[in-house]
């Protein structure tokens, strides 16, 4: 199978590395609107052809599939072009920047009969796959309460580079550059992480915050107006309540996803920082003493492998574009809920004094 990559940035490097390792897959081309970047990327990853013109790359009949690693606001136009050219497509998350666009992409892919998947990469963690199986088996009983967090700290830590200098981080902070903030960027991951095992989210109440970060909240032509922190209260189709949060201000964590699911007969906890292939459970006789044990989860094929397998078999594996659009519906509801803010401000005298040294 011959595959091309759209976008030659940071995540595209992961695509090149993973697809390059799969037997039977050849990464034959890369396209970036920045031609120099495309050429440097091709050289770095041993890819024969580099393009600055997407149309020229997509016109090649020998390319069957593309992976799209452009910024969020560019996914729709580039994916629709690839679908129109009849290419199978793996697109980065979030699928688009609103539900209507995401639905349009899902419908276009379905009508064109191409395999379509969205890179909700944390589904590759064996622990989350096993968590889904446990919930589905009824081992936890009726799920009552859920708690999911995605903690990043790149607005504090320099471990991944400088947010105030690198375009890779600056576009994520700016709505004008197509970003929906932390909610669109990794909120989509944690909403999937919670609802993949527990079930669809049917109600949401959301609070977003964009903190002041630079003079005038602007750096060059990046207006820093996208949300940095998101708090969600959700209800699931099965009736459980949950809290879901995502932030770039979680000092002390680079990229930490956690999930707790509490049922009336048992509970589970996933902490990907601690282990991607282990989860903790409290079941059966352990419920009364609240004793937890660790379970090993069987290995899970990567999304790159599942995309390639889907093309070979003709059976579109999950998560597909329709799933991406369903998540986008939750994101849209979050923005609406935030805009209609029903939080109650407390009068000054009723608030406790801040703690000082
Ligand atoms: N699944 C995951 O876990 C995960 C992790 C990181 C990033 N991502 C996603 O990957 C995508 C890319 O993120 P990144 O950090 O690599 O960004 P990046 O800024 O490093 O790279 C994006 C690249 O796309 C190029 N580009 C922009 N518009 C283009 C166009 N019209 N045609 C061709 N190329 C174009 C840019 O020049 C840049 O080189 C985002 O959607 C992001 O949300 C997903």
Image: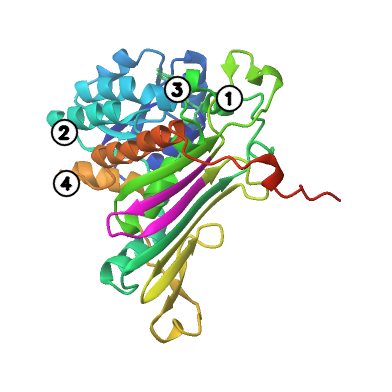
In the drawing, does residue 196 fall left or right of residue 12? left
Mark 1 vs 2: CB contact within 8 A: no
User: Which residue sits at x=53%, y=41%?
Assistant: 344
- Give the magenta-colored segment's residue range: 230-245
Circle 1: element type: helix
| Residue nearest the observer in this picture, 206 or 92 | 206
Q: Position of residue 172 (x, y in %)?
A: 53, 28
The residue under label 3 is 178
**Residue 19 location, quadrant:** top left
How many C-alpha atoms fall within 10 Å of the one at disc 3: few (<14), some, or many (≥20)? some
Residue found at the very far right of the displayed protein: 357
The residue under label 1 is 170
The residue under label 4 is 315
Look at the picture and state if 127 lies above or below 37. below
Look at the picture and state if 85 lies above or below 93. above
Q: Is mark 4 within 8 Å of ligand 1?
A: no
How many C-alpha atoms fall within 10 Å of the one at disc 1: few (<14), some, or many (≥20)? many
């Amino acid at each position: 199978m011959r595959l091309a990559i759209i976008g030659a940035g940071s995540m595209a490097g992961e695509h090149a590395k993973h697809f390059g390792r799969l037997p039977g897959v050849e990464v034959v081309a890369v396209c970036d609107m920045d031609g120099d970047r495309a050429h440097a990327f091709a050289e770095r990853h041993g890819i024969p052809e580099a393009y600055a013109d997407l149309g020229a790359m997509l016109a090649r009949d020998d390319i069957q599939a593309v992976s799209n690693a452009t910024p969020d606001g560019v996914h729709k136009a580039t994916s629709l072009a690839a679908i129109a050219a009849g290419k199978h497509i793996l697109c980065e998350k979030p699928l688009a920047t609103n539900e209507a666009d995401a639905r349009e992409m899902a419908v276009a892919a379905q009508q064109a009969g191409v395999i379509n998947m969205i890179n909700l990469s944390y589904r590759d963690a064996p622990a989350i796959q096993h968590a889904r199986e446990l919930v589905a088996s009824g081992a936890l009983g009726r799920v009552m309460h859920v708690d999911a967090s995605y903690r990043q700290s790149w607005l504090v830590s320099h471990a991944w580079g400088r947010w105030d200098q690198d375009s890779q981080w600056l576009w994520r902070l700016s709505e004008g550059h197509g970003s929906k903030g932390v909610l669109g960027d990794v909120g989509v991951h944690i909403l999937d992480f919670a609802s993949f095992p527990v079930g669809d989210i049917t109600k949401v109440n959301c609070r977003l915050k964009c903190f002041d970060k630079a003079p005038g909240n602007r750096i060059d032509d990046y207006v820093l107006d996208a949300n940095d922190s998101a708090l969600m209260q959700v209800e699931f189709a099965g009736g459980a309540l949950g809290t879901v949060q995502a932030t770039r201000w979680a000092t002390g964590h680079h990229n930490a996803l956690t999930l707790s699911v509490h049922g009336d007969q048992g509970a589970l906890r996933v902490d990907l920082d601690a282990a991607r292939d282990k989860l903790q459970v409290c079941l059966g006789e352990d419920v009364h003493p609240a004793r937890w044990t660790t379970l090993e989860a069987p290995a899970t094929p990567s999304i790159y492998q599942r995309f390639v397998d889907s093309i070979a078999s003709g059976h579109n594996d999950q998560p597909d574009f329709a799933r991406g659009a369903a998540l986008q519906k939750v994101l849209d509801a979050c923005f609406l809920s935030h805009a209609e803010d029903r939080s109650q401000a407390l009068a000054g005298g009723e608030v406790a004094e801040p703690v000082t040294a």
